């Protein structure tokens, strides 16, 4: 019952979370011109965590895949707990926005609550912001101008500031991608593109 049983269990749980998230996000697309399936985003968030922190527990990787199903798809904490476990459900709940609040209030709450997140939720939040900021290079939301993009990067930086402690590698990845986004969009504007 050594490592192969543990690996199988991890693979099963992770694939179950991908299946759950794919079904939940089935009708959603990212906001950029590529119109890519939304599921690519939560899979990327989980991938970023495992690339930078390869010893991350399975419940964190599953929560990363599921991180938007409460706020975007109407799944409940209890539904996630039943399908997975309480640990996964609690992480997902921690990183979920309350869609009943206005957008600006939700954004402010992410900054306010970030210092109080569990370390597992901080990993998910950090990887989520890396993926979202990275999209500003590859698939910028339609209609966003340079000021809106740079304001988003600044806001994301404020959100992840208290999360950095959980992963220097993810923090470095965030710094690199945010620097690239700032440079690219500044040069693009200066060139009149």
Image: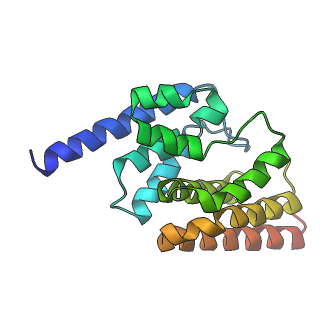
Q: Is residue 19 left or right of residue 8?
A: right
How many numbered callouts? 0
Residue 133 image position (x, y, % from top left): 67, 59
Considering only vertical position in the picture, is 142 above or below 55?
above
Q: x%, y% of residue 153?
A: 74, 63
Where residue 109 appears, as percent x and y from the top left, is 74, 51
Residue sitting at x 59%, y 53%: 128
The answer to whether one can see residue 2 in this image is yes
Left or right: 164 in relation to 56: right
Residue 42 position by quadrant: top right
Q: Quadrant of the C terminus?
A: bottom right
Quadrant of residue 126 within the rendered picture: bottom right
Q: Residue at x 85, y 57 (%)?
A: 148
* Rendered residue at 62%/67% (across/down): 162
* Residue 28 visible, this angle: no
Residue 158, position as x, y percentages in the image: 72, 66
Residue farthest along the left direction in this orientation: 1
């Amino acid at each position: 019952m050594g490592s192969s049983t543990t690996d199988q269990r991890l693979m099963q749980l992770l694939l179950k979370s991908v299946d759950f998230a794919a079904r939940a996000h089935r009708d959603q697309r990212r906001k950029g011109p590529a119109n890519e399936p939304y599921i690519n985003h939560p899979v990327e968030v989980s991938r970023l965590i495992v690339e930078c922190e390869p010893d991350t527990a399975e419940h964190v990787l599953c929560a990363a895949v599921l991180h938007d199903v409460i706020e975007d798809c109407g799944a409940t904490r209890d539904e996630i707990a039943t399908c997975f476990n309480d640990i996964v459900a609690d992480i997902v709940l921690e990183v979920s926005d309350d869609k009943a609040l206005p957008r600006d209030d939700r954004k402010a709450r992410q900054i306010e609550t970030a210092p109080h997140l569990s370390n597992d939720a901080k990993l998910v939040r950090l990887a989520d912001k890396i993926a979202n900021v990275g999209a500003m290079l590859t698939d910028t939301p339609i209609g966003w101008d340079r000021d809106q993009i740079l304001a988003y990067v600044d806001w994301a930086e404020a959100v992840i500031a208290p999360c950095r402690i959980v992963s220097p590698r993810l923090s470095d990845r965030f710094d690199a991608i945010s620097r690239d986004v700032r440079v690219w969009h500044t040069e693009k504007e200066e060139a009149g593109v």
